[in-house]
Amino acid sequence: MLRHSLGTHLLEQGMQLEQIGQLLGHKNLDTTQLYTQIPTKKWKI
């Protein structure tokens, strides 16, 4: 869970997916995408 949180936080702060993958030690960006999930915000009108 910590890896998911870190990856998502870094992505939200503007870090490139490739850099996050290197930091997490991934060889494939598909794996990095699993660890970086931006939550969808629902807006009330």
Image (spheres, grey):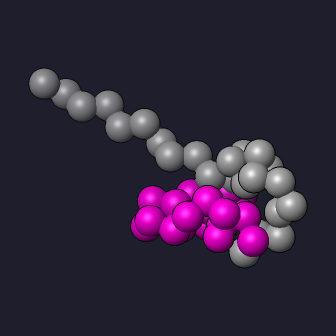
Q: Is residue 44 above or below residue 6?
A: above
Q: Is residue 23 above or below residue 14?
A: below
Would residue 21 be found to the left or right of residue 44 on screen? right
Residue positioned 72% across, 75% down in the render = 23
Task: Give the image quarter of residue 16.
Answer: bottom right
* Residue span colored magenta: 1-22
| Of the pair 43 and 17, the residue shown nearer to us | 17
Would residue 15 be found to the left or right of residue 41 on screen? right
Tell how many labels: 0
Residue 3 percent location from the top left of the image? 71, 63
Residue 31 percent location from the top left of the image? 79, 50
Q: Is residue 4 magenta?
A: yes
Find the residue positioned furthest to the right.
27
Q: Is residue 9 magenta?
A: yes
Find the residue positioned furthest to the bottom.
23
Residue positioned 83% across, 63% down in the render = 26
Task: Give the image quarter of residue 18.
Answer: bottom right
| Of the pair 23 and 3, the residue shown nearer to us | 23
Would residue 42 be found to the left or right of residue 21 on screen? left
Find the residue positioned furthest to the left.
45
Residue 39 percent location from the top left of the image? 48, 42
Q: Is the magenta stretch mostly helix, strand or loop?
A: helix
